[in-house]
Image: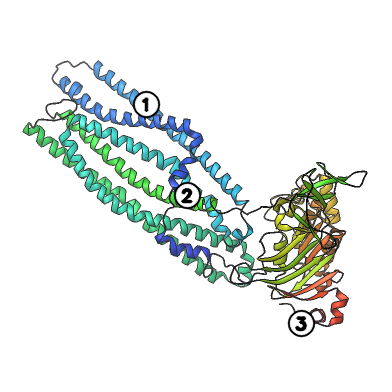
Amino acid sequence: MADRQEIRRGPGGPGGHGRRAMMAAPGMKIEKGTIKRLLSYLGEYKLRLSIVVLCILISAGAGVASSLFIQNLIDDYILPMLLEASPVFTPLLQAIGKIGCVFLAGILATFFFTRTMAIVSQGTLKLIRDEMFEHMQTLPIRYFDSRSHGDLMSHYTNDADTLRQMLSQSLPQLFSSVVSMVAVLFSMIHLSVWLTLVVLAFTVMMLVVVKKVAGRSGGYFMKQQKSIADVNGYIEEMVGGQKVVKVFCYEEKNKEAFDKKNEELCEAATAANTYANVLMPIMGNLGYVLYVTVAVVGGAMAIAGVSNVSLGGEPLLTLGTIASFLTLSRNFVNPIAQISQQLNAVIMAMAGASRIFKLLDEVSEEDAGTVTLVNTRTNEDGTLEECQERTGAWAWKVPNGIKVMQQNGEITEVQNPDSGFALVPLRGKINLNEVDFGYNEEQLVLHDISVYAEPGQKVALVGATGAGKTTITNLINRFYDIDDGKIRYDGININKIHKEDLRRSLGVVLQDVNLFTGTVMDNIRYGRLDATDEECIAAAKLANADGFIRMLPEGYDTVLEGDGSGLSQGQRQLISIARAAVADPPVMILDEATSSIDTRTEAIVQRGMDNLMKGRTVFVIAHRLSTIQNSDVIMVMDQGRIIERGNHQHLIEEKGRYYQLYTGAFELE
């Protein structure tokens, strides 16, 4: 989008997206409904989750049973055996065997619910990632132009990973801890109400500590997530621009900028983890204090003969009761520490989920177009008929009520009672009438632009960087919608044409070539996925690319990696042209397709483009005037306006801006 007047800065630049996010992070709040929305993704795992809940209950019950067994073990087995001259160990061994079975059931239940939650969490993340990627395909170009690619990638990596940790670990542990606390509480009441009150009083004090520590760490965890996205965005930007970094010796400045961002991440992560990590030692030490307190109070009550109040009906505190209660008190405190610890992971995951749902809530590209592109064949009477097979003949299927401009300039409304639509042959005539456009409301980029491209014409756009050339092609593709004026394609307002069909009728060859990991054949077939190998090879020959492709190690089956970095710029451009050729569109847009290659390679690429342009309406954007001299119409642009138009000879005779450019008296900037 080189023609923009306002240049988007990356995450490292002043006012960048990542920086703004960092400044806003301390006051950032989790969006309402995030938890409910996240849990809705677990709906298809209801059966598995029900089994998980059952397993957690079994695991918690096994833990409580082991604590209660201590009382039974001491009071009913060990103490009586101490009074016998010849103790019989059989009942003790049987009791140990029974509790061993309980332990085994608890271990198996824990293993099963942990394994099941791993399946549930990964399945849920797959669903979320699929939905994110699917939704991302529907977003307008404007969305990607205004955001760092690294920040977008962070949704799929860091944000998704925090959700994985929460779903597979934090949520099960939270539920398990709550169940354990409830079970332990009733078990303590079963043994002694007085000692239970001591534990609850001490727990209130512990909760105050947890609230203060965990509350401070939560905000820093949210800030940490934003910082990670910012750092990732900067790294992605710098990796993509390493050649520029090296050429301009920007390494030191680059490191300074990264150090600053990394320092912000370090500070946020350090603060978050400091508060999170200090919580467990604090809770552990408080647990020891509680352990000693219960032992002292329980021992004093037993020695003093204080009557015990319990659901179990024990009149006095026995040694077994106190020992069992001490274990239960530890089991009651530990879940509190675990809950507070996992809450930090939940807060961090909620911050990640908020970012993911913000992406999913982005408004998709609007498309109210009802005119579609269909294959046609000509009947014996000369009328067009829609068909399913590819014939090479296309037409616009225009529903009733859509206005179409006729050849004489008259605008008529389609009215066809028989079929409800009309077939308008696709010819490739594109008209821009008094078009105004701006990337933002404050500043227009194009002013009163009128362009008339007849079928088969070659229209060239010339002008300095920022003049608005690429913007015109973006509007024809409907990457952006105009602010005022009209753009008509074969007499049809392009706002009425379904975007997918509109773009299917346009072929684009850009200055920056994007090749994808895969074979050369796959990259060519990207232009039309149903193209046969023979059609791809024919397109490569048309683009003058067949010769060098056959010289590759595996020919058309050679696998390209890293955006085709093993190929020269000219070879990559020829593959790009072949990709456009296999699509066989009636209209071609060539945006600075030869500006980054040498003159000799340009001649080869130009021959490929000349073959591609035959019989098509073509828009050419070029700095090298030698490539556009044979254009039917040349338009010279300056600051969003067309200042000259005509063919090469006419503009030379006028001796205006084009003449100055051609003779070297004026140079493009």
Q: Nearer the viewer, residue 410 or 559?
A: 410
Disc on the earlier residue, 1 or 2: 1
Inter-mark Cα distance, 3 to 2: 55 Å
Left or right of 562 in this view: 159: left
Question: Given the image, on which type of amino acid does mark 2 rest?
Answer: Ala
The label on residue 104 is 1
Which quarter of the rendered picture does the N terminus lie within? bottom right
Disc on the earlier residue, 3 or 1: 1
Residue lying furthest right: 380
Residue 88 visible here: yes
Q: In the image, residue 385 lies at what x, y percent?
A: 85, 44
Q: Which residue is mark 3?
A: 666
Left or right of 203 in this view: 581: right
Q: Which residue is mark 2?
A: 353
Inter-mark Cα distance, 3 to 1: 87 Å
Left or right of 607 in this view: 465: left
Inter-mark Cα distance, 1 to 2: 37 Å
Question: Given the image, on which type of amino acid does mark 3 rest?
Answer: Phe
Q: In the image, residue 135 lies at what x, y percent?
A: 59, 49
Question: Given the image, on which type of amino acid does mark 1 rest?
Answer: Leu
- Classify mark 1: residues with Cα within 10 Å, few (<14), some (14-19) or many (20+): some
